[in-house]
Image: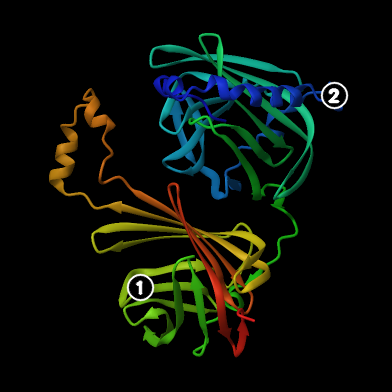
Amino acid sequence: MNRIKNLEHVSATGWTAPLAGFIVVLALAALAPGRAWAQEFPIEEYFPLEYQAKWLYLEDGRAYVTSYLGTERVHGKSSLEFGEDEDDYDGYVLDAAGLWMVHEEDSYFTTPIKVSDRKVKVGDQFESTHRVEGEDVTETMKWIGPEKIQVKAGEFTDCLGILQETSLAGEIVSTSVTWLAKGVGTVLEEGKDEDGELYRSELIWARVQSGEIPADNPTYPICEYFPLGKEDSWTYSDGSSTYLYSILGTEELKGIRAVRRGISTLDYDTLVCDAKGLWEYGESRRLHSAPVPISPANVKLGTWRDSTNFEVDAMVSNRYTFLGTEDVTVYAGTFKDCLKFQLVYTVGAERTLAEEAEDEEYDEDDDEDEDEEEEDEDEERYTFFWLARGVGIVKQQEVRGEEVETEELIRATVGGKSYGDK
């Protein structure tokens, strides 16, 4: 559920006009015929705040994980924190009066936003007003449904929806709808982001008190999808140039045989795929401060691996997340049921004591400084890659902001079998 936190941004991006069509769509959803529910349901059944639960979502092609992060005191009550990490989370309070949202990320609402009573039914509506930059902002939560919702995690029947409208000076400036499944929580959210663009966030996988979703969650042996035979080779194209990758040899690392895969003796990755899974030990003659886990030996939905390394002069964080299987067509042909992974690679610039002292003297009222992009801000990159069984990487995409670089397999020889260029 997204709210506005900067009024200047709202007026600058002109939310109101592009929202018109989207509001019509949500209004039709609210009025759509369905089986009306006169009975009330405990909010906990549709909005579970479980300590051990985890949810994996896909938004505009990128995956993120939501889980319980801890508690803190907000407005004199214990707020449960749920989100991806300490920089991206929401705070909820569940008390005798109902469910409240008390903050989004580091934006704490002057007045808690009411989501529902302890028991909810279709047609219930709740309105709350809080202050943003000295202006009153009104949040309206209307419960709609029931609806059948289809997402990547499966089909969910009798879902309840929260139609949320954010108003400033009596004018609607943002609208979203969040669909909740009994015993699961949020399975789909659609709305407008702060730039006025439509977004869709859907559930891929979850582990809740009732079990794992989807229940049928097969495992895949990663080493069969990432072969490292000594005679193997792969040729890729980015549309303008071609690159030949091959196995350049092996080395012993603390009793483990690692394989060098790359373009040359100056440009390669040091990899291990064994009973513990797939690991990257280093790049181009430089070993990581600790091995980087990519995948367990048997991977399935709900699998992600986090790691942090100190590289030269910066801390580097990696998160590899398995996103499921897809058929992929590239220059070398069509490969069925490829494993798709997402890598989020974050570089945090190392800061000197002088830079930190300078920040303490920073004047927040200096508009020119506020408009400047800080050079030491963390850089985050997304890479997606697809693995075909018995072949290896058949496609890779690196995303930096609006820039997307794609490499596709042209030909390969793996395990004595040739692919492509037929």
- Depth check: 202 or 409 in front? 409
Which amino acid type corresponds to the residue marked 2 in the rendered image? Ala
Residue 371 or residue 378, whichever sits in front: 371
Q: Residue at x 62, y 72 (%)?
A: 388
Q: Nearer the viewer, residue 73 or 378?
A: 378
Figure check: 295 above or below 365 = below
Which residue is at 42% across, 19% downward? 7
Left or right of 313? Residue 409 is: right
> Looking at the image, is mark 2 or mark 1 earlier in the sequence?
2
Q: Secondary structure at mark 2?
A: loop
Residue position for label 2:
36
Give the number of the disc on residue 283: 1
What residue appears at the point 24 percent right and 64 percent down from the top-left corner? 312
Whole-number angstrom distance, CA of label 2 to CA of label 1: 59 Å
- Res 78 seen here: yes
User: Which one is closest to the eye, mark 2 or mark 1?
Assistant: 1
